[in-house]
Image (tube, rainbow, N blue to C red):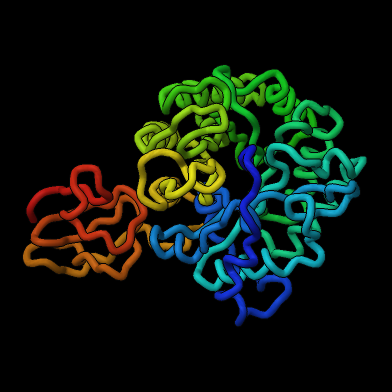
Amino acid sequence: MRRSRLAAIGLAAATFAATAVSLVLGAPSATAALSNNWYAAAPYLMPVSNNPPDPITVMNATGLKAFQLAFILAPNGGGCSPTWDGTNAVSSDTTVANVISRIRSNGGDVSVSVGGYGGTKLGQTCGNVAATAAAYQQVITKYSLKAIDFDLEEPEYENTAAIANELGAAKTLQANNPGLFVSVTMPGTAAGTGWFGTQLIDQAKSIGFTPNNFSIMPFDGGFNGGSSQVSALEALHGLLMSHMGWDSATAYSHEGFSGMNGKSDAAEMFYTADFQTVYDYATSHGLGRFTFWSVNRDRACVGTTDNGVCSNVPQNDWDFTKFSVRFAGATPPQTTPTQPTTTPTTPGGGSCTAAEWDRTKVYVKDNVVSHNSHKWTAKWWTQGEEPGTTGEWGVWQDNGAC
């Protein structure tokens, strides 16, 4: 996932200093895992560069519960110890630890992404699978992680030995951390993924490694809107069937979309309408992941056109993040749900038999409520959105008078 070819804009320490002073420095406390649909929907957030927004503000505005924090790299000077962005050692980190603590204190959690576009990756420097896995285990242990993303891009992507280290490490971590949610993210092409991506899938197959999903990034490759991205995802579906030996449903459930909101590095433009197109495809075909790069960019450009910190398309703050929230609610979790899947049937609303809508409650897909003498069904996760006020494209489906 590309950080942006433009320079990063400052450290998160300044952004979070005022709100983090009351936190105890050190590793964040462990938290109960979210259901996997949240890790599958977690959008990318750079917590120490690209002018990061306050994650609590984003969570409270959208209902988001999980972020994909980026990126873990090898030290810029070389070595086999994990760092944030090649500069800040995980072993001595307090800044990101405090961000994670705040997210967890607000009812959320994080996944951590390793790799990304540019920089030196641990798979290149650690020498073998065991050493690579040990370096990543430090990150999992430090932050009590329940999810990790292997974002395998340049310059590592074309390095066969490095990719073997990364995938071997991912398999080791999966075995040594039961229940760990593991994503593999790679470049996308019109053919689904390119030659090196296909080799990557073959390598995973050869070592018996099955991640929760293989995700492609269909941007920076001549893409033109959501329909071209859907076409690439359908091509990836075919590759997963033929190279992993999966049936159609299994391939879809292990497939993911990792998009870019707004203007890409290659000047492709992706609007909220394009995200809607891909979202509709993802939910109707049962895809296993829907994420994007990045929350740092999920705001309108005001006083700058820096692609690292704003989208360069018309939008309100966090419009793209709301798709992640919807996907988490629309996608069946791969673990026991933490939220009820049905609503109480206590009579309410006159002759309506479903419970009266409650502004404070969380509703998920297919929950039914009564409101203003009508029956309403939730189309995805929601809280505080009043039935009848969000229009045809809103969260509530009007089922008529009751």
Q: Quadrant of residue 242?
A: top right
Asked whether residue 1 is in view, the answer is no
Note whether 63 is above or below 243 in the view shown: below
**What residue is drawn where x is 82% and y is 48%?**
74
Across and down, in percent, residue 48 comes to 65, 58
Image location (x, y in percent) of residue 58: 45, 60
Which of 39 and 189 lies nearest the eye of the viewer?
189
185 left or right, relative to 60: right
Relative to residue 209, is residue 236 depicted above or below?
A: above
**Along the viewing direction, whichever of 275 and 52 lies nearer the viewer:** 52
Write the residue at 41% across / 60% down: 63
The quadrant in which residue 392 appears is top left
Question: What is the x, y in percent for residue 130?
Answer: 89, 46
- Residue 82: x, y in percent? 81, 54
Image side of residue 3 versus residue 85, left or right: left
In this picture, residue 185 sits left or right of residue 362: right
Residue 175 visible in this rendered orientation of the protein: yes
Question: Quadrant location of the N terminus?
Answer: top right
Horizontal side of residue 348 vs 73, given as left or right: left
Q: Is residue 25 above or below residue 326?
A: below
Number of marks in the image? 0
Viewer-nearest residue: 199 or 269: 269
The C terminus, quarter of image: bottom left
> Which residue sits at x=47%, y=21%?
231
**Which residue is at 53% across, 51% downward?**
296
